Amino acid sequence: MNNKRVKWIDIAKGIGIILVVLGHSNWFFAQATTTMFIQKYIYSFHMPLFFFLSGYLFIKEKYPSFKAFFIKKVKTLLIPYFFFSILSVLFIVILNLKNLDNLISFKTAIIQIFYLKSTVVWNEPLWFLVCLFVVEIIYYFLSKIKSKKIIVFILLLCSITGYSLSFIINYFILPWGVGIALIAIAFYGIGNFVRGNETLNKITLPNVPVFIICLIISVVIGGFLNSIIVMYLYQFGNIFYLYIGAVAGIIACIQLSQFISKQNIIIKLFEYYGKNSIVILCTHYFIFKILKRINVLNIIFENCISVKGYAYAFITLVICIPIIFIMNKYFSFILGKKANKTLEISK
C-alpha cells in the first residue's frame, strides 16, 4: 500500500474516533437531548467505518499461517481488551471507595467482560476490540474460499442471522459479541472486496460528485429515515437502511479524508488521532468519569446544554494527547506495537 492510501486511512480513522468521542460525550454529558439528529447520523456509520477499514487492510498473504494471524490479533486486540477491562474494574473501585455499595459483584464483572452484556464493566467502548477479534477470525477462514459468490452468500446469511438475534437479545445472547460480529462482518467483507477490486477501489479516490451524493444519502437515511443504530446494544433499525446508510456514510468519510489529505495544516491532527484510535477508544470513558466529577466544569456548562457534549468531547480529545504519548512510550506492548513507533505528535 502506498503512502497516499496509508494517509487517507489514518485520516478516516481520525475522523471516526473523533465522532466516537463526540457521540459518547453527547450521551454521557448532555443525554443527546438537543442533538438527536446529529447523534443518529454519527451512529449510522461511525462503527461500521472501523470494520470497513479493518477489512480493507486485511491481506491474508501477510500471514504464513493461521497461528501467526491469531497471535497477531491476540496482541493487538485481546491483550488491550483484557488490560483495559481489568483497569476499568480497578478504576471504578478507587472512585467508589467511599460508597462500595455501588460496585458490581466480581461475578457480574466477569460475565460482562466475556458476554458484553449491559456494560463492559462500565467502559462500553471496549466492546469493539473483542467484536473485531471475532470478525477477523471468522473472515480469515472465509477468505480461504475461492468463490466470491459463496463468500457474499455467507456474509448475507451472517447479516440475516445477526439481525434476527437482535429480536431475542433479552432472552438469549452469544458470548463475546458474536451476534454483533455477524452484522459487522459484512462491513469488514465490503472493505476487503473494495481493496481487491480495481473498479470498487475507485471509491477511495477523491471525487466531489461521489462525496455529495453519498453524503446526502447517508444524512437522509441515517439522520431521518432509520432509527438510531447502537451496534453494542443490538439496535440496528431497518436492516436495509442500516447497510445502505452506513456504506454511504463510509464512502462520504473516505472522500472527506482524501480532501483533508491535501490540506497540510490540519492533516497531522487527524492522522495522529487515527494512528492512535485504539488508545482513545479505550481511555476516553476514564476521562469522562473524571470530568463529570469536576464541579467547576459542571457549573460552567450547566446552562449550555446545547454545546455541553461538544465542549467535553473537545476537552477529552486534548487530554488524550499526553495519554497517547505515555501509552506509546511506556506501554506500547499492551497495544501490540513496538516501542517509540508512533510518538510523533506534530513537531
Image (spheres, grey):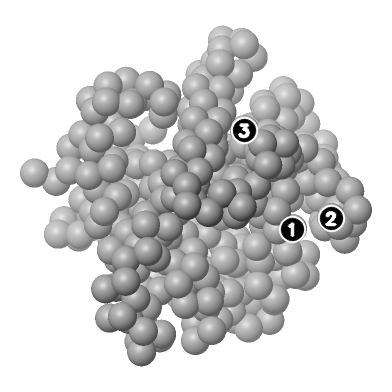
Q: x, y percentage for residue 154? A: 82, 40
Q: Which residue is mark 2?
A: 169
Instruction: Say which element carries label 3.
Output: helix
Tell me which residue sits at (28%, 31%) in the image.
328
Q: Quadrant of residue 311?
A: bottom left
Q: Nearer the viewer, mark 3 or mark 2?
A: 2
Q: x, y percentage for residue 47? A: 56, 55
233 and 263: which one is in front? 233
| Residues at discs 2 and 1 in contact (Cβ within 8 Å) | yes
Residue 299 placement, left or right of 55: left
Q: x, y percentage for residue 232? A: 66, 54
Inspect the image, locate mark 2, and give the three-letter code of the amino acid beneath it.
Ile
Crowding at mark 3 (Cα within 10 Å: few <14, some 14-19, many 20+): many
Inspect the image, locate mark 1, and give the three-letter code of the amino acid beneath it.
Tyr
Q: x, y percentage for residue 125? A: 54, 50
Instruction: Say which element carries label 2.
Output: loop
Alpha-carbon distance for marks 3 and 2? Answer: 21 Å
Q: Which residue is mark 1?
A: 234
42 and 148: which one is in front? 42
Crowding at mark 1 (Cα within 10 Å: few <14, some 14-19, many 20+): some
Sooner in the amino-acid sequence: mark 3 or mark 2: 3
Numbered label attached to residue 133: 3
